[in-house]
Amino acid sequence: MKNHHPVTPKEERLAQILAKIKGRDFRLTPQRLAILNILAASEDHPSVDDIYKEVRNRFPTTSIATVYKTIALLKELNEVLELGFPDGSNRYDGHRPYPHPHAICTRCRKIMDPEISSVDELSEEMKKKTGYSFSFHRLDFFGLCPECQKNSRK
Amino acid sequence: MKNHHPVTPKEERLAQILAKIKGRDFRLTPQRLAILNILAASEDHPSVDDIYKEVRNRFPTTSIATVYKTIALLKELNEVLELGFPDGSNRYDGHRPYPHPHAICTRCRKIMDPEISSVDELSEEMKKKTGYSFSFHRLDFFGLCPECQKNSRK
DNA sequence: CATATAATTGATAATAAATATCAATAGATA
DNA sequence: TATCTATTGATATTTATTATCAATTATATG
């Protein structure tokens, strides 16, 4: 079982990204591939440093600059979503790069990706009323998750 | 015509904020009042530096640290909304502090505040599906404004 | 398969936004 | 008016990100 056509959604996604990269005379380096895989695989929302630490498990010489550069590339290709935290740092969502909102706990930092049907309507309304052509977005709600709510009531 | 009860929405708003400040043994300093007025008056979305420059017209000794501290206070009181730019810097919206989306041009940096009716539904759905209690949010769409779209088509 | 070209890496310096520090100042209260 | 303590202002520090550039290496080509 070696080279084969993509079957799972994840493999398909990865294949698409690779096609995009090859199509624009970017090069496919092992570091990039590793970062890509980490992002595509992670169900949570890693920081640059999280990603950095994980890549170094497989490629111990990887520089943090490479992580930043790869993420910048993926942002440009619209294959990763950047969540801006109020403290100035960022998190990355490589899982569902189309518009979707996050629920972010400001205490424990837990992030949820609920399925929200009204997003499409919102996007549509925004496009109609502004005339903008959007390429990315941040739809993030900040507050307390259910657990932290309990703990804060004494 | 000196001290009088608030009549315009803006005056009312300001009066509310002042009440909040007094209620929590914060002090009402001239610098704070000036920053507050700037934010309440500005129809666009100033950066910290924009605000800093404007305060210094009236209070030339004002420090940038004071601007940061005042904005932090207003964020805490939920009286100003922070927009995170992809470049890491922030903009501030003191005009409509309840949930509303922005359309941000990544080329000319123009920001629009359209009236979007589906936001309420989105907020409601988010609350129901996550159980979070939200205190602030970022609903920002990034892309090209109509003018920059024209200019980019050769 | 060997080679040439140019994109990319890795190490580190530079930048920039925001926060922390702390003595001096000045609101608020009695 | 005097006291108390939050706030200011100046600056140092922190932290995230970007820039720089020589060395490396992916890719195309002969």
Image (cartoon, coloured by chain):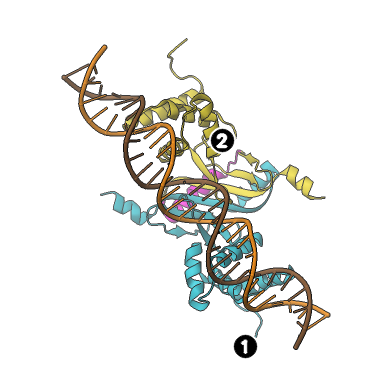
Chain colours: A yellow, B cyan, C orange, D brown
Q: Which residues are magenta?
A: A115-132
Please tell me if label 1 and label 2 are on a single chain: no
Quarter occupied by residue B73:
bottom right
Residue D2 to residue B137: above or below: below
Chain under disc 2: A
Q: Residue B85 — which label?
A: none
- State which chain disc 1 sits on: B
The amino acid on which the numbered mark 2 sits, given as a three-letter code, is Asp
Residue B110 lies left or right of residue B11; in this view the side is left
Of badges 1 and 2, the one in the foreground is 2
Disc marking residue B2: 1
Name the quadrant of the N terminus of chain B: bottom right
Q: Where is residue A77 drawn, in percent x and y?
A: 41, 37
Image quarter of residue B25: bottom right
Residue located beneath label 2 in the image: A50
> Alpha-carbon neighbours of circle 1 within 10 Å: few (<14), some, or many (≥20)?
few
